[in-house]
């Protein structure tokens, strides 16, 4: 009977070692998956928060078509009265704030999702920097933005001006 008990004890000891050997890699894999999922959730949360602000801006564009603030500029913008000029300034300042948030969230990120998002935002911001009303709003907004964002915008404005002066090359 002692031999049977010792054999059973040895078998259970062996099984416990096997469980440990299999459990550690499984636990590490589960931890890795959990960390990746949390990272994805944060990235999509970031995307959704920024998207919500941008959708609010689009709604403002839709409700105020006389303001030349939509992504596609008016070919021949209508003259604005003083109230409309102020509304346009406010709308573009809101857009600047959204762009600043995009810059802070995406510009120097390493994940593929964030790099793709920044690429789109960078092109979007560059398009707006070509617009006179956006540049006026930027000048009026002053230095109230993140210093990195301010440096980025100054660099983009300089590039846009250079492109305008040298359209062929």
Image: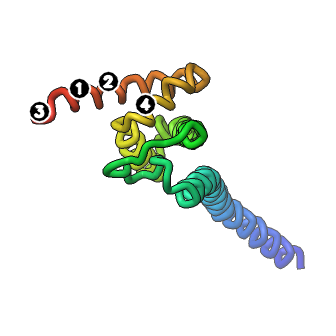
Residue positioned 51% across, 37% down in the render: 103
Q: Nearer the viewer, residue 38 or 135?
A: 135
Q: Secondary structure at mark 1?
A: helix
Q: Secondary structure at mark 4?
A: helix
Please tell me whether residue 18 is drawn above or below residue 53 in the rendered image: below
Residue positioned 45% across, 22% down in the render: 151
- Would you name the residue on which mark 3 appears? 169
Residue 28 visible at all? no
Q: Nearer the viewer, residue 48 or 25?
A: 48
For marks 1 and 3, the one nearer the N-term is: 1
For marks 3 and 2, the one nearer the N-term is: 2
Which quarter shows the N terminus? Answer: bottom right
- Would you name the residue on which mark 1 appears? 162
Q: Are marks 3 and 2 in contact (CB under 8 Å)?
A: no
Numbered disc in front, either 3 or 4:
4
Numbered tag placed on residue 135 in the rendering: 4
Could you tell whether 108 is left or right of 50 in the image? left
Numbered tag placed on residue 66 in the rendering: none
- Would you name the residue on which mark 2 appears? 158
- Callout 3 crowding tier (Cα within 10 Å): few <14, some 14–19, many ≥20: few
Between the C-alphas of marks 3 and 4, the distance is 23 Å
């Amino acid at each position: 009977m002692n031999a049977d008990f010792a054999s059973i004890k040895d078998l259970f000891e062996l099984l416990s070692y096997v469980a440990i050997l299999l459990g550690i890699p499984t636990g590490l894999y589960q931890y890795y998956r959990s960390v990746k999922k949390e990272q994805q959730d944060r990235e999509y949360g970031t995307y959704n928060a920024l998207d919500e602000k941008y959708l609010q801006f689009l709604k403002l564009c839709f409700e105020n078509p006389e303001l030349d603030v939509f992504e596609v500029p008016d070919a021949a913008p209508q003259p604005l009265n003083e109230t409309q000029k102020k509304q346009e300034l406010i709308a573009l300042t809101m857009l600047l704030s959204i762009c600043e948030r995009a810059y802070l969230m995406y510009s120097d990120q390493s994940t593929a999702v964030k790099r793709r998002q920044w690429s789109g935002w960078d092109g979007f911001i560059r398009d707006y920097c070509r617009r006179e009303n956006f540049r006026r709003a930027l000048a009026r907004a002053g230095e109230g933005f993140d210093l990195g964002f301010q440096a980025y915008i100054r660099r983009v404005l300089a590039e846009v001006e250079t492109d305008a002066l040298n359209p062929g090359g």
